[in-house]
Amino acid sequence: MRQLRAFAHRLGNLVRRNRGEADFGAELESHIALDTDAGIRTGLDPAEARRQALIRLGGAEQAKQAHRDRRTLPWAEDLIHDLRYGVRMMARNPSFTAVAVLTMAIGIGATATAFTWINGVLLRPLGGVTDPNHLVVLETVTPNGELVPNSYPDFIDFRDRLKLLDGIAVTRPTALSVGRDDHADRVWGELVSGNFFQVLGVTPEAGRLFLPAEFADAPGKFPIVVLSDRYWRSHFNADLSIIGRTIPINQHELTVVGVASPSFHGSLPVTAFDVWIPYMEQPALNGVQEWMLRDRHNRNMLGIARLKQSVSIEQARGELKTLADFMAIANSNVSEGMSATLVPLSESPHGPQGLLAGPLRILMGVCILVLLIVCANVANLLLARATVREKEFTARLALGANRSRLARQVLTESLLLTGSGALLGLAVAPWMSHALRSLMPPGPMQQLVAMDTRPDLAVLAFTAGVCIFAAVTAGLVPALQVGRLNLSARLNAGARSGTASRSRNRLRSILVGAEVALALVTLVGAGLFARGFFETMHIDPGFNPDHVLLNQFYLNTNGYPLAQRKEFCRRLAERMQAAPGVTDVAYSDGVPLNFEPSWWEELKIEGYGPRPNENMSIFRNVISPGYLPLMHIPIVEGRNFTEADNEDKTSPDVMIVNEAFVRRFFHGRDPIGTRIHGWGSWFRVVGVAKDSKYHYLGESTPAYFYVPFRQIYREDMNLAFYVRTKGEPDSVLSTLRALVRGLDPNVTVFDAAPLKEYIGASLYPQKIAASLMCGLGSIALLLAALGLYSVMAYSVAQRTQEIGVRMALGARPAHVLGMVIKQGLALTAGGLIVGTALAIAMARAVSSVSFSNSAMGSSATLLGDGANHPLIYIAAAAFLCVIATIACVLPARRAAAIDPMQALRIE
Amino acid sequence: MGDKTDVWQGTLALMVLRTLESMGPQHGYGLARRIEQTSGDLLQLNYGTLYPALLKLEQEGYIKSSWGTSENNRKAKFYDLTKAGHRQLKRAAAEWEQTTAILARFLTPAEEA
């Protein structure tokens, strides 16, 4: 307690140092005067009395120093001194300061931004929920080990039987239309199990959330809805009276029971939903048949569960697996070989984070590379300055300064530099964070992305850590150097030193080498990603997306029953076909190379015995007869669908398979006429379509099949409408709008876009990786070139005298030039060797990073095919050599032009 | 070395407190002289070391200081005990007595045995 009081006093005295100093001076004076008086009284003459008083005092200056040390905190005082001195030094060398602070700002700003994203996407994914650390994602596992969503009946079994979980909820993201007729808004919401909010632990902002009585599984019982805070504010002006009233959603009146808390945006990370509706309202909302809700095949629910306190994820996973394996046997007709597992929230393969996780990790890695280059640069700058200040340091050492004290000062100065850089970097970071939105593919995903970009404690702590790391990395080498200063040697040899000391030269060489190595790694990285991107860009998708306009209809949001939807499509296609400038019209369920997961069906193929545990879930599309011709996908065998392949009981169910399907399942047998079982009935193969790309341009073609729209189209499917035009696809947009309005004024054309733009989305992760790498790569290159140049220029300047001597002894300018360049290149070569090794290791690590928007087996790697392109390594190395040469030649020429006499006279 | 000065500081602090208690407000020079006298001139005090000790006591709140005039009309800073200082003196004196008593048992030749 008393110590604390004393500490507070001393801390306070730091601020008013001068007053204490004067006060004690006066006190000492009075002390000496009193003692002198006493001496005089004993008969001494005044001068002698004063002398003896001073002796008894033991030195006024020592007394003052001891008093000062006690009065304030010596280390804090040193720190203040160092800081002041540092600021003065910074102000005195504005160009040095500007370069160092700016490079630091780039390094730290980039790293902080990357961390902000990672923090938002991966580390604290869900806002507004209670204790997110106990939330896990529940996934069904296919026999092949792929993770897929769950079916509602499976969910009921899980919910009712698992003991180690504190509740399981399921949710299905969906587009809804809110409002009536032509005033409708398209809104993204989640269809959720009744216990959704309870499991997540969400609190209401107003009204209430779903009550336990409303958790029941009976279809259509609870026509209620919970709104998001932002939708409530933007569309209802935060009006409390909306609670208890009904709003039309998909032309169906739902009662608003409450508003969720403002920080809650739904169950998918970085995604913002606006309405939550009980899953069992689906039959009313979008005409899904009740039997579908009870169908274990219908795996479209994302599961989210809460672990009981003190239950580990492994324990819960074990319990779930036992139950799921049992269910797989009990329901072997639909679930044979299936299992289930739990994964941490941050590893969920669904939603934007599945797309962003890989690229973000790489981004972080690159940022750290850039930061290291920045540190090497600043260390070099500090080292160069330490050499300049060698005289100052030796003088201070000679006057009795402590080595550790000097080293501390150098570290303080580097901390000051990185600190200013970090502040600057942090100021930019929130603004940069918004750019994350632009990294998402266009279309619905982009609207959905919502991230909290305010820097939180984690980001600040991380930045502070990075800052200290950078300060120590950049400042350590110069600080050690100060500790090693040899006083006598320096004072003796100082004036006539030919070259800088050997150990310092070695240190700086290592730094330059490190910089070259790091720059090579970033350059190679940028090259590999760019190459991977362009290679994928030039992959033939196997269909022709040019001149095609695509529009996705959400007819279920308009309350259309199934038959009417089909009728709508047929009539719209008929009218569109007749419009001027239109060559083909088609519609389907899934869009190729779209960024939404495509669906699959489990098949039994006549004459093919699946291997044990073989995944017979095959991707499919449900298409109109016009689809394959419109896409320019040729039928290589058999025939295309016709309007005769329809709902009519007399027309048999038919199927078209792709070549990969034939290769996988038919082994030379003729596929035409074979019977294949799916959706509970037998289909006959009538044609074989040429392979094309379905999910990612980089994918290896999977087995794939098509079924006729009129035979298989169901309530829960999407509807994509394609129009091929003679001219620009946008030219028919107004025609399409008019025709749609003519058919039904309530249906709106929300987001029609050329197919070519739409499928560009599938390239997104690669595009991000490539553009980020190229951007950061050029920054790294610039920094490395700057560092290289400054170091070379500096070391040449240091050797001015030596060069002068050499030239006085007859060396020709060409010799000097050659010598300097040779040394520079030797350094570069060393760095390149290390860099190549690092780059190869990096490429290996990164080539395994893939991205996916569903875990259903279909993913593509970021780097394209493999990471071994020697040409990229050679080009990057050559490029760096050129930069290094330029960095050497400029100062070398200046050195060679020196007049020997002048050089010798320097100092 | 650090330990020695701590012990010295501790005892010096005790001497200062005790002297102030018996003599009332006193300036630094007077305190130093008085401590020397009390010790029977056995203690050759380096007067300079007294001031950091005084400062420490003051920071800890055991003594307070104010400028005043000395008996021979010189401006001087006077130190005086605070309430906390009185308490501390009692406590420290008791501790010190106990310590010396224990040490005395070790240092006097054993008789009873």
Image (tube, rainbow, N blue to C red):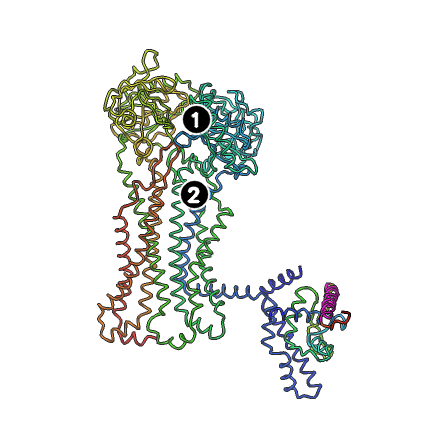
Instruction: Verify whether residue B94 appears in magenta.
Output: yes
Quadrant of residue B7 within the rendered picture: bottom right
Q: What residue type is labelled 2?
A: His
What is the count of numbered marks? 2
Residue labelled with disc 1 = A299
The residue lying toward the viewer, choosing from B70 and A319, is A319
Please provide the residue range marked out in magenta.
Answer: B84-106
Residue A592, above or below A372: above
The residue lying toward the viewer, choosing from A739 and A523, is A523
Q: In percent of the image, x 36 and y 17: which residue is there? A: A681
Residue A454, above or below A479: above
In the rendered image, is residue A187 in sight? no
Q: In percent of the image, x 44 and y 73: which residue is there? A: A394
Dot 1 or dot 2: first in sequence order is 1
At label 1, counting other C-alpha atoms closer than 10 Å, the crowd grade (few under 14, some 14-19, many 20 or more) is: some
Q: In percent of the image, x 40 and y 51: which residue is there? A: A368
Instruction: State which chain disc 1 sits on.
Output: A
In the rendered image, is residue A178 in sight? yes
Q: In percent of the image, x 70 and y 88: which residue is there? A: A43
Residue labelled with disc 2 = A434
Q: SS class of the residue under badge 2?
A: loop
Q: SS class of the residue under badge 1?
A: loop
Residue B2, above or below A684: below
Q: Where is residue A323 in the image (x, y as percent from the top left)?
A: 49, 28
Is A722 left, or right, of B20 in this rendering? left
